[in-house]
Image (cartoon, rainbow, N blue to C red):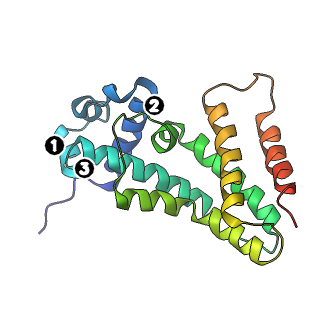
Amino acid sequence: MPRPKTHDDALRVRLLDRAGELVSAQGASALSLRKLASDVDTSTTAVYSLFGGKPALVRELYVEAFDRLGRRLRTVTPSDDPKEDLVRLGLAYREAALADPHLYGVMFGDVIPGFEPDEDAHAEALAALAPLRDLIHAGVDAGVFAGPTQDLAVACWGIVHGLVSLELSGNLPPDLDVERTYERALRNQLVGWLL
């Protein structure tokens, strides 16, 4: 009879979440494998067994962050209205960031000095944004959006990333209705890209 697997996916996710929290709150120097294991009530052996060491843990944290973003974006099922789909996609982006704020800096910040994703990790990160590219491409092909596709994709990403970054860093006015303002910004920026 095979030994039961003690280092399962649930432990992997807990370790990645805690690693993201440590890095997000205290900086990369706070990410010690011993502290991480202790915080998650496991052993450093489990961390090494699951990730192989700190560099692999950091890489996996980066990939996991983008995977979660991509999964959230893929929940937006395309309809026959690309304009509304694009707004829904922007809302899903914000939801993903708010659900895992400790991973946002891992994806887009320099919270881990010296970390450079390898080619495969970079490709996985780009794949997370495929729903945005696919939707815009379909909207351009359908004659709803003005191209070029890449310009629109970068503009849409820039709007959502900028607003979410301001929100997560606490740099928005305290009396601002963030949800309403965010959606208005998405809808208003879209107007300039319509045919």
Q: Amino acid at mark 2?
A: Ser
Residue 169 in the image, given as x and y percentages of width and height: 60, 28
Query: Relative to 94, is 70 above or below?
Result: below
Mark 2: secondary structure: helix
Q: Which mark is residue 51?
A: 3
Which comes sooner in the sequence, label 1 or label 2? 2
Residue density around tag 3, few if under 14, some if 14–19, many if 20 or more, within 10 Å = some
Residue density around tag 2, few if under 14, some if 14–19, many if 20 or more, within 10 Å = many
Residue 108 in the image, given as x and y percentages of width and height: 51, 42
Q: In the depicted view, which residue is nearer to us: 58 or 21? A: 58
| Residue with the mark numbered 2 | 24
Which residue reaches farthest bottom?
Answer: 142
The quadrant holding residue 97 is top right
Q: CA distance from mark 1 to mark 3?
A: 10 Å
Which comes sooner in the sequence, label 2 or label 3? 2
Front: mark 1 or 3: 3
| Residue with the mark numbered 1 | 45
Q: Is residue 190 left or right of residue 11?
A: right
Q: Amino acid at mark 3?
A: Phe
Residue at (72%, 59%) from the top-left corner? 152
Which comes sooner in the sequence, label 1 or label 3? 1
Q: Is residue 174 left or right of residue 105?
A: right
Q: Is residue 54 left or right of residue 1?
A: right
Mark 1: secondary structure: helix
Q: In the depicted view, which residue is nearer to us: 14 or 184? A: 184
Q: CA distance from mark 1 to mark 2?
A: 24 Å
Residue at (38%, 46%) from the top-left corner? 61
Residue 7 in the image, given as x and y percentages of width and height: 24, 52
Mark 3: secondary structure: helix
How many marks can you see? 3
